[in-house]
Image (cartoon, rainbow, N blue to C red):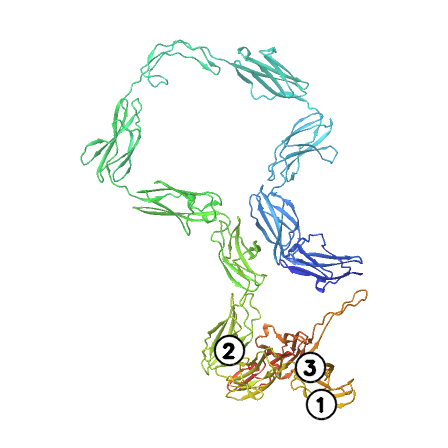
């Protein structure tokens, strides 16, 4: 049993900090027997549904992908088994934007402001809260507008609000990672306050136990409807006010008072925001019955009624105590019946008369009497009835035909009735018969005839009715014309005339002069004519276009977004001008409705928006000229999008933006700009700054290598306008740093081979290519000579003997780096270097039947010729044995090696400078040959004999491990093993039979030739043993052999460049069977572990670390791995920049020669 244990890593004992959207991994080793049960929890019980938990007996792992601010906090790990329990915790801080602020409250509301308070967010996103952003939204709108984008306290007064409107408010916290989640008011807030106190209070009535009060409404309701009024009272001598009534009207009766007690009253108004200050009754009130002399409150004293209808006479009065009421008619007490009766109430006396008649007419006296006095009032009642008939006879003074309802030339008699408000009287006696007729005459001349217009073939006339119509209705008008050239008058209208008082006289001869006259027609005939003044020449009347702009259109026409724009302009001109509406710097929307006549033109545009702002032009044109005017229209709206949004600069963690103000400011001054960013992998924008007062901004703290969209919006007093957005995502990267050190790999008479190291930083974007430039000596111009995607290039077409400078630039998608120049100039000439051959090893081993490839490094300029000898004779090349050469290697290939391939191979390299040779030995591994005879018998006795022999000529490529000696009695054919483990070349054979004849034979055995047989015996629990199985037959006991293999990281493929004083390392993976022996060489000298050369070889890897590099550390390093199957080598060149070496007149860095010459610089 083992109690649970938790091994928290040192990093987990600190606060684990992680960026939002990354993956949280908590790996914790655990112990315990039996395997403990694992449980992960959060400190405050938060859910772990998003977490992936993996647990074994030795560890537990919690993974949360795509973390956010809510994943911050304490993660508690509890493990438990039967031996106990153990608990540990890990604090995690997610670097994110903040959570929502807490406890948002409305502290105060007035008729134009709202004061907010809140608490900081529970989760600050792992960074200090820099400021808060306060926003508002009218309940009728969907978009929030910024109130304050840089609030440094936890409260804010939002003012300049519209009284009576409802608003929502929200607050967001901001830290260095951006703007966090909002906290919002759950319900809209009405911008109002408590009402003002009620107006003047009036005491309406007092009794011994009640008071009736009334009051005026408050002068201002605080922006919210009055819900009711609260009436309070205070007894004399008491300081306590108590509520005695709550009402919704401006009047209340307070009951339950104590007679004789003195009270003070006050009234408060209440709306949804609270209770107003109270308005107090000016004087205290004593609860007692009032004594008031009777008095009438009549508005009038005469009452009228139609005969047969009911009359109700209401007489209001005052009096305390209630007065007695008595009625008199014509100085006689009124006799009450079912038709006439009188009633009285507290404040009224009512006399009711049903079906009034003439007998009810008269003077009525009302008398009021109480203990305080009496009062009387006289009332007059008038009953309205129909009059009597008029007195005759009826006389007819004049007869015409225009009396209503009469038919002309008919005979009529007449009678008369009188009528008043009550109705008609009986008719008078009828008159004699009279005929209805009226005398008529011809009408007078039409009034004010005139010419209103003239065209090339017509004249427009107008006139008025005659002043005298002759006593008969005008039935029409006759128009006549006269061509002055012939003097004859002709009628232009039908003979019966026309009804209109205007006419177009058509089909006139152009350029002729005409006169016109007009006559009116009635029943009596055609009246006197009226001449149109002067004569008229028939020709087209020309008038230049003109228009009348209303004074309102001469100013800027302001219209709210969503409203309708209506432009009405009167026009004139002959002929009727052609009308064109236009818009400066744009087109009028197709939705515009344009209506044009000869006298006006109008443009109507409904549901206008910011893009409808601008200067509208109106152009009139006819044959007489043109006329233009413009109307400036300003649509009051949020601004349009800023223009010309550009990326000014990009670095590896920032983007600088610039833009120009919107073309349309929405009719109000631009207050500020809002800059937002969005990662290309996300859908939502996050605010960068909401109160920018310039037209540029540097967006920093961006993630290097990520893609972002950016957008900018302008804000005016009407809200936030349309955004301008980058069309493509912007990668946050910059031009790369220059390439690393440049190395010259080769020089010829017309080419240079260069290589270089990658830049230390790619600027956040992948390197696309490298540009190589060169500059000839004496020239200031750099010209491009190569573009490559690798870290090397060959520059050709150079001029022999010319001196050149070279430089290299790295290119990514953001541009070119600064150049890295080669330190010294290069002369284009062939190098002359003495040949050299340096085998990595002196011997190579291979199993018979397997292939062998021997690579021998060579050097020299010009390229040397290579010759191979075997055992002093030229190597005979076949398809199985052949040699191939490359620039720096000569390679011997042996396929299916045989033991004849073993021997000494000599390699000779030669060029015009000299010659050099080296040799290697190839060992083939196989079974050994038989030992060399004859077998000698050194000592012979009756029972023994001593044998001796010589080792085999061919040992199989490895040491002889033992000899096997067999004997055979010559009388039999069976060979018996004397010994299979003879270590030397002599053996004493004993236990022989005296007198017998024996033959002996001897085998040599190396490590590849030992043979064994195997069989298996079963044994059960009872100890019984079975018979052995069949033998496996002889099996040669030999190791599994595999030629050594060496693999190195691709970074070691090229020459390693080292600066003086630096530390460098060479490492590789090594494999082979049996395990190879690993050695490091520099040149032909084996390296040993020293203070500067630290060698750390294992069974499967090789590592050498060279510290504080100096010049002698440059050169070729050779890694050798060898076993019985053979040897494998790998050569690596190390170049250093520590001195300059001269070869003839050619100067270059020593590092170049370190790669070509031996380490000693020979």
- Earlier residue among tags 3 and 2: 2
Q: Which residue is mark 1?
A: 936
Circle 1/circle 2 CB separation < 8 Å:
no
**Quadrant for the C terminus in the image:** bottom right
State whether residue 857 appears in this view: yes
Dot 2: few (<14), some (14–19), or many (≥20) neighbours within 10 Å? Answer: some
The label on residue 346 is none
Q: Nearer the viewer, residue 587 or 115?
A: 587
Mark 1 vs mark 3, foreground winner is 1
In the image, residue 1094 lies at what x, y percent?
67, 78
| First along the sequence among labels 1 and 3 | 1
**Disc 2 on helix, strand or loop?**
strand
Foreground residue among 523 and 835: 835
Callout 3 secondary element:
strand
Per the image, the residue denoted by label 3 is: 1005
Give the residue displayed 78% in from the left and 85% down from the top: 993
Characterize the local packing of mark 1: few (<14), some (14-19) or many (20 or more) Cα atoms within 10 angstroms.
Answer: few
As measured in the structure, the alpha-carbon distance from the residue carrying label 1 to the one carrying label 2 is 70 Å
Mark 1–mark 3 distance (CA, rounded to whole Å): 20 Å
Q: Which mark is residue 753?
A: 2
Percent across and percent down for residue 1066 are 63, 76
**Residue 16, picture quadrant:** bottom right
Of residue 1088 and residue 322, the one placed in the foreground of this image is: 1088
Q: Nearer the viewer, residue 773 or 1031?
A: 1031
Q: Are marks 1 and 3 in contact (CB under 8 Å)?
A: no
In the rendered image of this protein, does residue 1014 appear above or below residue 643?
below
């Amino acid at each position: 049993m083992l109690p649970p244990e938790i091994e928290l890593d040192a990093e987990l004992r600190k606060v684990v900090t992680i960026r939002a959207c990354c993956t949280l991994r908590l790996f914790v080793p655990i112990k315990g027997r039996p395997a403990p049960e694992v449980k992960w929890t959060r400190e405050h019980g938060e859910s772990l549904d998003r977490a992936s938990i993996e647990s074994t007996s030795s560890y537990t792992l919690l993974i949360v992908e795509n973390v956010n601010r809510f994943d911050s906090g304490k993660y508690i790990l509890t493990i438990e088994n039967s031996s106990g329990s153990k608990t540990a915790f890990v604090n995690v801080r997610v670097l994110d934007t903040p959570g929502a602020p807490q406890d948002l409250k409305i502290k105060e509301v007035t008729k134009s402001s709202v004061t907010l308070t809140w608490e900081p967010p529970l989760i600050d996103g792992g960074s200090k809260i820099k400021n808060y952003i306060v926003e508002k939204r009218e309940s009728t709108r969907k978009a929030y507008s910024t109130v304050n984008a840089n609030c440094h306290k936890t409260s804010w007064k939002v003012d300049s609000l519209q009284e009576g409107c409802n608003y929502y408010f929200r607050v967001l916290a901001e830290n260095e990672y951006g703007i966090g989640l909002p906290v919002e008011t759950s319900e809209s807030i009405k911008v109002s306050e408590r009402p003002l106190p009620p107006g003047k209070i009036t005491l309406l009535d007092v009794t011994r136990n009640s008071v009736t009060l009334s009051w005026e409404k408050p002068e201002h309701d605080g922006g919210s409807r009055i819900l009711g009024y609260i009436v309070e009272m205070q007894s004399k001598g008491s300081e306590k006010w108590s509520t005695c009534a709550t009402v919704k009207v401006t009047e209340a009766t307070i009951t339950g008072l104590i007679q004789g007690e003195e009270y003070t009253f006050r009234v408060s108004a209440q709306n949804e925001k609270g209770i107003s200050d109270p308005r107090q009754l000016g004087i205290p009130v004593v609860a007692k019955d009032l004594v008031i002399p009777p008095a009438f409150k009549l508005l009038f004293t005469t009452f009228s009624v139609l005969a047969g209808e009911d009359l109700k006479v209401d007489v209001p009065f005052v009096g305390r105590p209630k007065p007695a009421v008595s009625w008199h008619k014509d100085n006689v007490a009124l006799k009450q019946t079912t038709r006439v009766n009188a009633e009285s109430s507290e404040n009224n006396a009512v006399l009711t008369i049903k079906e009034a008649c003439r007998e009810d007419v008269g003077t009525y006296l009302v008398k009021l009497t109480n203990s305080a006095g009496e009062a009387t009032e006289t009332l007059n009642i008038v009953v309205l009835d129909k009059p009597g008939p008029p007195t005759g006879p009826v006389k007819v003074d004049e007869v015409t035909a225009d009396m209503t309802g009469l038919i002309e030339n008919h005979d009529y008699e007449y009678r008369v009735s009188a009528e008043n408000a009550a109705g008609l009287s009986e008719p008078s006696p009828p008159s004699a018969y009279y005929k209805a007729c009226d005398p008529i005459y011809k009408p007078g001349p039409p009034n004010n005839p005139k010419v209103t217009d003239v065209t090339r073939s017509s004249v427009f006339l107008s006139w008025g009715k005659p002043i005298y119509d002759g006593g008969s209705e005008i039935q029409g008008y006759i128009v006549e014309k006269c061509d002055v050239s012939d003097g004859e008058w002709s009628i232009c209208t039908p003979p019966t005339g026309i009804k209109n008082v205007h006419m177009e006289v058509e089909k006139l001869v152009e350029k002729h002069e005409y006169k016109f006259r007009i006559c009116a027609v009635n029943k009596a005939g055609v009246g006197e004519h009226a001449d149109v003044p002067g004569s008229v020449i028939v020709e087209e009347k020309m008038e230049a276009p003109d228009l009348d702009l209303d004074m309102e259109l001469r100013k800027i026409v302001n219209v709210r977004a969503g409203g309708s724009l209506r432009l009405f302009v009167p026009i004139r001109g002959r002929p009727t001008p052609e009308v064109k509406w236009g818009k400066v710097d744009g087109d009028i929307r197709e939705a515009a409705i344009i209506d044009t006549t000869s006298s006006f033109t109008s443009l109507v545009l409904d549901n206008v928006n910011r893009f409808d702002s601008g200067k509208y032009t109106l152009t009139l044109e006819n044959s007489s000229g043109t006329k233009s005017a413009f109307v400036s229209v300003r649509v009051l709206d949020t601004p349009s999008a800023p223009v010309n949004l550009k990326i000014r600069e990009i670095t590896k963690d920032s983007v600088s933006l610039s833009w120009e103000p919107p073309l349309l400011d929405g009719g109000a001054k631009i207050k500020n700009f809002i800059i937002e960013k969005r990662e290309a992998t996300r859908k939502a924008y996050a605010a960068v700054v909401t109160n920018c007062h310039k037209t540029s901004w540097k967006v920093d703290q961006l993630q290097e290598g990520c893609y972002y969209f950016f957008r900018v919006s302008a804000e005016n007093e009407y809200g936030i306008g349309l955004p301008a957005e980058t069309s493509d995502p912007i990668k946050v990267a910059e031009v790369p740093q220059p390439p690393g050190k440049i190395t010259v790999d080769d020089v010829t008479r017309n080419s240079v081979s260069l290589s270089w190291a990658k830049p230390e930083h790619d600027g956040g974007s992948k390197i696309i290519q490298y540009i190589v430039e060169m500059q000839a000596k004496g020239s200031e111009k750099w010209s491009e000579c190569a573009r490559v995607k690798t870290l090397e290039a060959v520059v050709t077409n150079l001029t022999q003997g010319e001196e050149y400078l070279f430089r290299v630039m790295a290119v990514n998608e953001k541009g070119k780096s600064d150049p890295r120049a080669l330190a010294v100039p290069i002369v284009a000439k062939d190098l002359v270097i003495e040949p050299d051959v340096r085998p990595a090893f002196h011997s190579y081993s291979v199993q018979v039947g397997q292939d062998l490839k021997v690579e021998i490094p060579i050097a020299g300029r010009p390229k040397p010729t290579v010759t191979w000898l075997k055992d002093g004779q030229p190597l005979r090349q076949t398809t199985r044995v052949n040699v191939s050469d490359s620039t720096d290697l000569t390679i011997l290939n042996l396929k299916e090696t045989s033991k004849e391939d073993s021997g000494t191979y000599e390699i000779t390299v030669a060029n015009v400078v000299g010659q050099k040779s080296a040799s290697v030995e190839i060992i083939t591994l196989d079974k050994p040959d038989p030992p060399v005879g004859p077998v000698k018998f050194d000592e012979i006795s009756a029972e023994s004999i001593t044998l001796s022999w010589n080792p085999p000529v061919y040992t199989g490529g490895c040491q002889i491990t033992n000899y096997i000696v067999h004997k055979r009695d010559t009388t039999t054919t069976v060979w018996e093993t004397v010994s299979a483990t003879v270590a030397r070349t002599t053996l004493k054979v004993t236990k022989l039979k005296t007198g017998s004849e024996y033959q002996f034979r001897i085998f040599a055995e190396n490590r590849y030739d030992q043979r064994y047989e195997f069989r298996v015996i079963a044994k059960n629990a009872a100890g019984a043993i079975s018979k052995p199985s069949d033998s496996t037959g002889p099996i040669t006991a030999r190791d599994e052999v595999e030629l050594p293999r060496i693999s190195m990281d691709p970074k070691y493929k090229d020459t390693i460049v080292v600066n003086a004083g630096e530390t460098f390392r060479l490492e590789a993976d090594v494999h082979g069977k049996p395990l190879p022996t690993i050695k490091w060489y520099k040149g032909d000298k084996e390296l040993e572990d020293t203070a500067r050369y630290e060698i750390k070889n294992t069974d499967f890897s090789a590592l050498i670390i060279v510290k504080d590099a100096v010049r002698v550390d440059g050169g070729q390093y050779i890694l050798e791995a060898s076993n019985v199957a053979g040897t494998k080598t790998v050569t690596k060149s190390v170049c250093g920049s520590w001195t300059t070496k001269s070869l003839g007149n050619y100067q270059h860095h020593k590092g170049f020669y370190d790669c070509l010459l031996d380490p000693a610089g020979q």
